[in-house]
Image (cartoon, grey):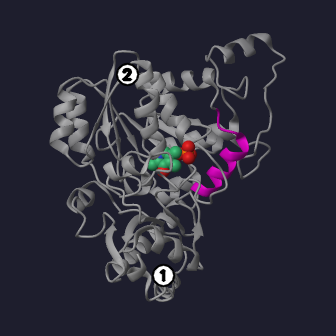
Amino acid sequence: MSEAKFSTKSIWAGERDSLAFGATQVPVVHSVSFGYDDMDEWYEVAIGNKPGHIYGRNTNPTVQAFEEKIRILEGAEAATSFSTGMAAISNTLGTLLFPGDRIVSIKDTYGGTNKIFTEFLPKQQVDVVLCDTGDHEAIEQEIERGCKVLYLESPTNPTVKITDIKRMAKAGKAAGAIVVVDNTFATPVNQNPLELGADLVIHSATKFLGGHADALGGSVCGSKELVEAIYHYREINGATLDPMAAYLLLRGMKTLKLRIDQQNKNAQEIAEFLQGIELVDDVFYPGLESHPNHDIAKEQMKGFGGMLSFSVKGGVETVRQLLPKLQYANRAANLGSVETVVGPSRTTSHVECTPEERAAMGIPEGLIRYSAGIEDIDDLRKDLEQAFKALPADLLIKN
Ligand SMILES: *Cc1c(COP(=O)(O)O)cnc(C)c1O
């Protein structure tokens, strides 16, 4: 399997051991426990000497197939799964960090992750240092001052800032840190953090991996040693992926390459189109030459992803009037789905933050996050065009 190309792997990888009765598709095994007539066999499985399943909070055949597929797609030694992306993040940090430890990260992480850094970790006497995203010198200086975990996300949510993963991972490793990268926005189609030097790769599988906005899940991939420790934390603390969700995620992942290729193309075209719209102030997309770290993105990514954001003149009022006029977009908090999804950052990724906190992160109140779907690009472009045209002429005068 390791020699096959990505789209072949995303279809075939990880499923064989979970098939039963000659089924060609992974069954959804809705069984809380797994029974044994042979007490010795039960014991061998329970202590991990023999493959098999004991209890659903620990392992399950459907969930295992999901873990195997993401493991192979990320080229990792091991993988484990979680009920949500946030569970993947909190369980990973819970496994790695103890009172007195120091974690270095960036200011632009996902809103929930940022809350872990600002609200929960400090209560556990973990020293959290958040650097300006993209300020590589500042991150390196903080790493050198001591760093148990270096936590990165690239591209970021929602202003798609880029961090040089290879350079930061090198600095992190030199300081003895465990380097963690949230790869949700890029997906393994566009970026492989392990190849760039990271130790652990996290996904909110809820987003692009599943791709249909119908299942929550998360994953962590990396070395056997680290992943086993994180798995142990999860099996005891209980944020287990449900078998039905695992099935939906597996099914979605079979078309990952097709979807991401189309979303990369659509996002690039929409970003370029928005640059020509008068009411648009700024367009943020790593595939644009105007992006401050376009060169780093080009170096470390195979595609620039399906996520972009843009700010509009007239701020919140323009957002309020523009978004309801779109015909082919869900106005919702998710992203990475087959349908286009739009939303103001102040009600989606960073709803947990105050306006001041958002301003400090460089997120204007009139910022719109745009998750490109796989629709025909002509329809998406026309849809935006008609929505901008239908705005009242005096919108900017009144505001
Ligand atoms: C959505 C998201 C998460 C959290 O995932 P959930 O599945 O919603 O818990 C983490 N990181 C990024 C970058 C995300 O977009």
Identify residue for label 2.
126
Residue 80 horizontal/vertical position (percent): 54, 34
The amino acid on which the numbered mark 2 sits, given as a three-letter code, is: Val
Give the residue drawn at x 74%, y 15%: 41
Q: Is the magenta region chiefly helix, strand or loop?
A: helix
Residue with the most extreme front position = 398
Q: Is residue 50 above or below residue 27?
A: above
Instruction: Mark 1: give few (<14), some (14-19) or many (20+) Cα within 10 Å.
Output: many
Q: Is residue 90 magenta?
A: no
Identify residue for label 1.
384
User: On the rendered structure, is 273 left or right of 131?
Assistant: right
**Residue 339 lies in what quarter of the image?**
bottom right
Q: Nearer the viewer, residue 355 or 367?
A: 355
Residue 75 horizontal/vertical position (percent): 42, 43
Give the residue drawn at x 57%, y 80%: 325
Q: Secondary structure at mark 2?
A: loop
Residue 230 horizontal/vertical position (percent): 50, 26
Residue with the most extreme right position = 37
User: On the rendered structure, is 269 left or right of 62?
Assistant: left
Region rendered in magenta: 240-253
Q: Nearer the viewer, residue 28 or 169?
A: 169
Q: Nearer the viewer, residue 198 or 141?
A: 141
Q: Secondary structure at mark 1?
A: helix
The amino acid on which the numbered mark 1 sits, given as a three-letter code, is: Leu
CA gap, disc 1 and disc 2: 45 Å
Residue 63 horizontal/vertical position (percent): 65, 39
Instruction: Mark 2: give few (<14), some (14-19) or many (20+) Cα within 10 Å.
Output: some
Give the residue drawn at x 64%, y 20%: 50
Q: What label sits on residue 138 in the rendered view?
A: none
Mark 1 or 2, nearer chain start: 2
